[in-house]
Image (cartoon, rainbow, N blue to C red):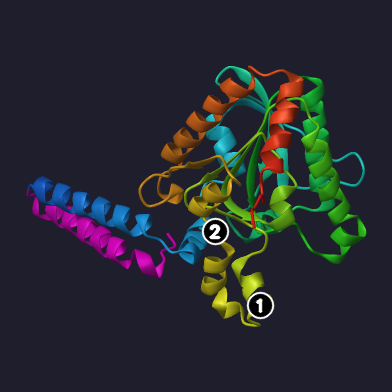
């Protein structure tokens, strides 16, 4: 599994645990107490390291290839998922998936960005960077949900919308802008969860929700740290400095009122325990859905409108 420089103390302890476990089996000795002691120490070190991550380190964790993706969360959280395809205009974008599902006995429409685990999958999923047809497909599914009075759950995980020539020719900016406008007027609850990367308009294209949440090792920002560094400092290597300036961590986003909740992750990040991470996400989604589903269609729209009106308020 990919490890980061800041994880070296954790890796060293894990190696010791594995070596002791192997030795105890080969020598037929009882080393259970020593193993428990090392495992406790590993958990303590892991907690301490992840509690004090710098902004760019959180960006690195958010991009970890073993983090659960949208389809992983759907399979762990939902039942009877029926994927729907196509925007009815151009094609089916595999980097943005969605369909009907059951969540704790409640029928919902669920959708989100989808990355790949290997080169072949990433080429198919375009590294989670959706095309205009992806955002148009998402809007089609959300309009179906609105007609059927189904709550919508969106999983955000993209470095940004695809900036290729073809995407621009087919109206990338227009597709995202229409989503922003139309999502604001939907009369059903919309819950958005940033599960990894929340990059620029690509994230906002499915990010207009009554409640926006973020996993504690994810980020949400107007531009990637590397892109910001290339523009401001003319040096992408200064991405860590840019990440500090962008204020993209869950703590900052809560302070600014961009998100309503930072969802905790298992010790060492969601990539270390998918099931536990999914449990935390499920609890938060179900809790907010129960509250939002008590509101009328007009109250849902007004609540969403007021949420976004408050963002960016300042005094001189």
The answer to whether residue 66 is visible is: no
Point out the residue furthest to the bottom here: 234
Circle 2 sits in a helix, a strand or a loop, which is it? loop
- Reply yes or no: does residue 6 show up in magenta: yes
Q: Residues within 10 Å of mark 1 (few under 14, many from 20)?
A: few
Classify 94 as above or below 98: below
The quarter of the displayed image where residue 307 is located = top right
- Tell me the tag on residue 190: none
Point out the residue furthest to the left here: 29
Task: Give 6 or 240, whichever is nearer the viewer.
Answer: 240
Task: Give 260 or 177, whichever is nearer the viewer.
Answer: 260
**Apparent side of residue 24 relative to residue 283 in the rendered image (left or right):** left
Measure the alpha-carbon separation of dots 1 and 2: 23 Å
> Which residue matches tag 1?
232
Instruction: Confirm or deny contact between disc 1 and disc 2 (CB under 8 A).
Output: no
Q: Position of residue 136 (x, y in %)?
A: 84, 43
Q: Residues within 10 Å of mark 2 (few under 14, many from 20)?
A: many
Looking at the image, which residue is at 43% across and 44% down? 265
Q: Position of residue 187 (x, y in %)?
A: 77, 25
Classify 75 as above or below 129: above
**Apparent side of residue 241 relative to residue 43 in the rendered image (left or right):** right
Tell me the quadrant of the picture where the C terminus can be found: bottom right
Looking at the image, which residue is at 7% across and 50% down? 29
Task: Give 7 or 76, whichever is nearer the viewer.
Answer: 7
Point out the residue furthest to the front here: 316
Classify 90 as above or below 168: above
Residues drawn in magenta: 1-29
**Apparent side of residue 91 relative to residue 1 in the rendered image (left or right):** right
> Which residue matches tag 2?
63
Q: Position of residue 239 (x, y in %)?
A: 56, 73
């Amino acid at each position: 599994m990919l490890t980061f420089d800041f994880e070296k103390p954790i890796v060293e302890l894990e190696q010791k645990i594995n070596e002791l476990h192997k030795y105890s089996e080969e020598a037929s000795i009882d080393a259970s107490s020593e193993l428990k002691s090392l495992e406790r120490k590993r958990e303590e070190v892991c907690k301490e390291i992840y509690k004090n991550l710098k902004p760019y380190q959180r960006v690195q964790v958010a991009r970890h290839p073993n983090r659960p993706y949208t389809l992983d969360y759907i399979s762990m959280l939902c039942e009877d998922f029926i994927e729907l395809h196509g925007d009815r205009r151009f094609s089916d974008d595999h980097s943005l998936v969605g369909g009907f599902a059951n969540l704790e006995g409640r029928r919902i429409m669920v959708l989100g960005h989808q990355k790949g685990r290997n080169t072949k999958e990433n080429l198919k999923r375009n590294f989670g960077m959706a095309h205009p047809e992806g955002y148009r497909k998402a809007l089609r599914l959300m309009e179906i949900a609105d007609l059927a009075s189904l709550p919508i759950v969106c999983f955000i995980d993209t470095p940004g919308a695809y900036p290729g020539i073809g995407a621009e020719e087919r109206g990338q900016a227009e597709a995202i802008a229409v989503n922003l406008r139309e999502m604001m007027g939907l009369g059903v609850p919309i819950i958005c969860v940033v599960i990894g990367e929340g990059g620029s308009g690509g994230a906002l294209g499915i990010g207009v929700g009554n409640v926006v949440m973020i996993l504690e090792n994810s980020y949400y920002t107007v531009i990637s740290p590397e892109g910001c560094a290339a523009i401001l400092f003319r040096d992408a290597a200064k991405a860590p400095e840019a990440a500090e300036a962008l204020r993209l961590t869950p703590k900052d986003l809560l302070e600014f009122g961009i998100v309503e909740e930072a969802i905790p992750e298992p010790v060492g990040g969601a990539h270390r325990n998918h099931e536990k991470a999914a449990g935390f996400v499920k609890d938060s989604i179900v809790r907010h859905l129960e509250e939002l589903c008590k509101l009328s269609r007009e109250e849902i729209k007004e609540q969403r409108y007021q949420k976004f009106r408050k963002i960016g308020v300042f005094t001189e």
